[in-house]
Image: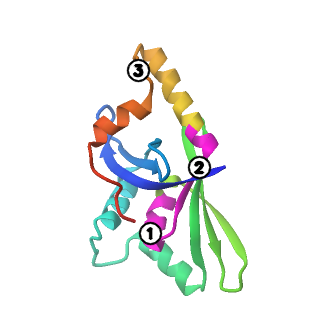
Amino acid sequence: MEIEVKIRGLMMDPNSGTPIVILKDVNSETLLPIWVGAYEANAIALEIEKIATQRPMTHDLLRNLIVEMGARVERVVVTELRDNTFFAVIEMRSSSGDFMMLDSRPSDAIALALRADCPIYVNEEVIQASHSLSGEQAEESGETGSGEDDEWPDVIGEAGDLPM
């Protein structure tokens, strides 16, 4: 089953200094952190803040190419978590109605989804695997608590869901 999510926040991991995109289930308080690269985080942040650049960024170029070819991005889906790496797909439809699916990194798919104004989904198994992984890491490090659902809201604060 796939769960629709929104971007809840964009933050820096205090331990590694790596950007993290926080996705939140639209129907619950479930959160999914995805570590992303600095350039992708910048592309996501620019679009969230609606900051226009003088020249098209890579994700703007990709959106423009899709539109000019007569296709549209219908949605993006974070499909898998394997060996601590997230995987995603971009689902598109051509002007003739043909369905197309492109393999993508989640960060690129999210940056494109913001520009294409389409929904973001996560496979339920990915969320479960992420929470299981977090629980195992907490046990190994001797941390206690009930997991990410308790930890992330304190880090993010009281801000509402970011606009898409």
- Residue 119 colored magenta? yes
> From which residue to which does the magenta span run?
108-127
Is residue 135 in view? yes
Q: State whether residue 125 is above or below residue 70.
A: above
Label 2 environment density (alpha carbons within 10 Å; few <14, some 14–19, many ≥20): some
Residue 82 position, x and y percent, is 62, 38
Q: Secondary structure at mark 1?
A: helix
Q: Which residue is mark 2?
A: 87
Looking at the image, which residue is at 33% across and 64% down? Answer: 48
- The reply, left or right, for residue 54 in relation to residue 151 is left
Q: Which residue is mark 1?
A: 59
Looking at the image, which residue is at 55% across and 78% down? Answer: 66
Query: Marks 1 and 2: CB-CB under 8 Å?
Result: no
- The reply, left or right, for residue 164 in relation to residue 66 is left
Along the line of sight, the residue nearer the viewer: 37 or 87: 87
Q: Which residue is mark 3?
A: 145
Q: Secondary structure at mark 2?
A: strand
Q: Earlier in the sequence, mark 2 or mark 3?
A: 2
- The reply, left or right, for residue 103 in relation to residue 162 is right
Residue 138 position, x and y percent, is 45, 21
Looking at the image, which residue is at 54% across and 35% down? Answer: 130
